[in-house]
């Protein structure tokens, strides 16, 4: 999910403005024609029983689908080639590899599909799973919770975007949820809000969801330049862009410190976040609040500090 934001953040030229407006139009058109249309039923194409959450033998190998832009942009943030002198540098370079799993086709973000995508990634060797999607209705929530716990049992960290509706997630639930049905936080799941590049009242993206309990930390998510299909590059904004920044940080840590568990990765990323007390506009309002009140850490992710903390843990473990 990405978000068009013209009110606070200037575009370099009119062409960029028109491009983002067209992309936002297409996204909302898909919402109206598919996601919000109760008559839309794509399951005959998928070939499964949507009510059977135990059914895992369905799907296809087409990871691009009708529009691979979002996934391509997210993947580039994590692992775009850092040595080819082209385009952008991913947060994590080699030996990090991307596993493409298309869990969410336009208009049909089913709990069952999300749960099965998590299990597929885990069973096929993924160690970090980025989840740049979300919704506000989860009729098969238990299946997703079971899949998250399954990933945890295999040592896999999940990184989830907080959402782009300027909601307080303590008041409005967004799924996959940051906590279990029993109200406990998942030890292997991070929820990420979107920040901008300005250390002032606009530090928090005005679209980002937030919460002192449900959102763990903020990461860059405004006008992020990354890969696009067809060997192109462009800017997108959203918590969908912030989550892969954190997934990339986790990938760097796991690459250099392979003994780190999913719980270790989560703890290090949170403990190394740089807190800020700057007064920011609470998303969706003009009210000024302390940035530290919008997430559990009150901070921004910091790869350098995370590596230092991981080194300290490694040194302590070898004594």
Image: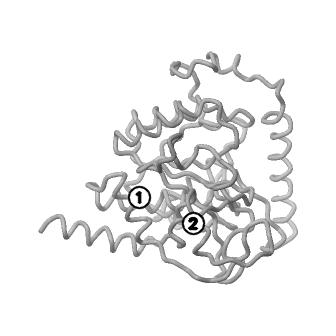
Q: Dot 1: what SS?
A: helix
The answer to whether residue 17 shows anywhere in this view is yes
Considering every residue shown, the one lying at the far front of the view is 182
Q: Earlier in the sequence, mark 1 or mark 2?
A: 1
Q: CA distance from mark 1 to mark 2?
A: 15 Å
User: CB under 8 Å between callouts 1 and 2?
Assistant: no
> Which of these two is toward me, 275 or 308?
275
Q: Is residue 238 left or right of residue 182?
A: right
Q: Determine the residue positioned at 86% across, 42% down.
A: 29
The answer to whether residue 234 shows anywhere in this view is no
Considering every residue shown, the one lying at the far left of the view is 319
Number of numbered discs overlaid on the protein picture: 2
Q: Is residue 209 left or right of residue 272?
A: right
Q: Determine the residue positioned at 82% across, 35% down.
A: 36
Q: Is residue 99 left or right of residue 277?
A: left
Q: Indicate which disc residue 266 carries.
A: 1
Compared with residue 172, is residue 20 higher up or lower down, i.e. above or below? below
* Occupied quadrant, residue 14: bottom right
Q: Indicate which disc residue 295 carries.
A: 2
Q: Determine the residue positioned at 48% across, 46% down.
A: 129
Q: Position of residue 218 (x, y in %)?
A: 57, 67
Q: Dot 2: what SS?
A: loop
> Which of these two is toward me, 97 or 113?
113
Q: Determine the residue positioned at 63% across, 78% down.
A: 290
Q: Position of residue 271 (x, y in %)?
A: 41, 69
Compared with residue 116, is residue 78 higher up or lower down, i.e. above or below? below
> Which of these two is toward me, 262 or 139?
139
């Amino acid at each position: 999910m990405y978000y068009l934001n013209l009110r606070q953040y200037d575009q370099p030229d009119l062409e960029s403005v028109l491009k983002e407006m067209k992309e936002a139009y297409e996204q909302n058109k898909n919402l109206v024609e598919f996601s919000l249309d109760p008559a839309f039923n794509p399951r005959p194409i998928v070939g499964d029983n949507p009510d059977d959450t135990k059914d895992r033998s369905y799907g296809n190998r087409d990871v691009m689908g009708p529009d691979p832009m979002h996934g391509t942009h997210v993947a580039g943030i994590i692992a775009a080639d850092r040595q080819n002198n082209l385009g952008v540098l991913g947060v994590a370079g080699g030996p990090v590899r991307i596993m493409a799993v298309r869990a969410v086709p336009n208009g049909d973000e089913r709990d069952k599909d999300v749960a099965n995508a998590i299990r597929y990634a885990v069973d096929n060797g993924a160690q970090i799973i980025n989840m740049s999607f979300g919704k506000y209705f989860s009729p098969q929530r238990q299946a997703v919770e079971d899949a998250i716990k399954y990933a945890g049992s295999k040592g896999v960290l999940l990184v989830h975007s907080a959402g782009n509706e300027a909601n307080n997630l303590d008041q409005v639930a967004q799924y996959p949820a940051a906590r279990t049905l029993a109200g406990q936080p998942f030890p292997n799941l991070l929820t990420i809000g979107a920040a901008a590049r300005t250390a002032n009242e606009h530090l928090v993206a005005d679209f980002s969801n937030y919460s002192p309990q449900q959102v763990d930390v903020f990461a860059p998510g405004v006008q992020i330049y990354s890969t696009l299909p067809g060997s192109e590059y462009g800017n997108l904004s959203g918590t969908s862009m912030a989550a892969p920044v954190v997934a990339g940080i986790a990938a760097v840590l796991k690459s250099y410190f392979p003994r780190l568990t999913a719980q270790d990765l989560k703890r290090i990323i949170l403990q190394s976040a740089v807190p800020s007390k700057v007064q920011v506009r609470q998303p969706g309002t003009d009210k000024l609040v302390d940035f530290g009140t919008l997430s559990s850490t009150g901070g921004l992710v910091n790869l350098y500090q995370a590596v230092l903390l991981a080194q300290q843990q490694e040194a302590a473990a070898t004594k």
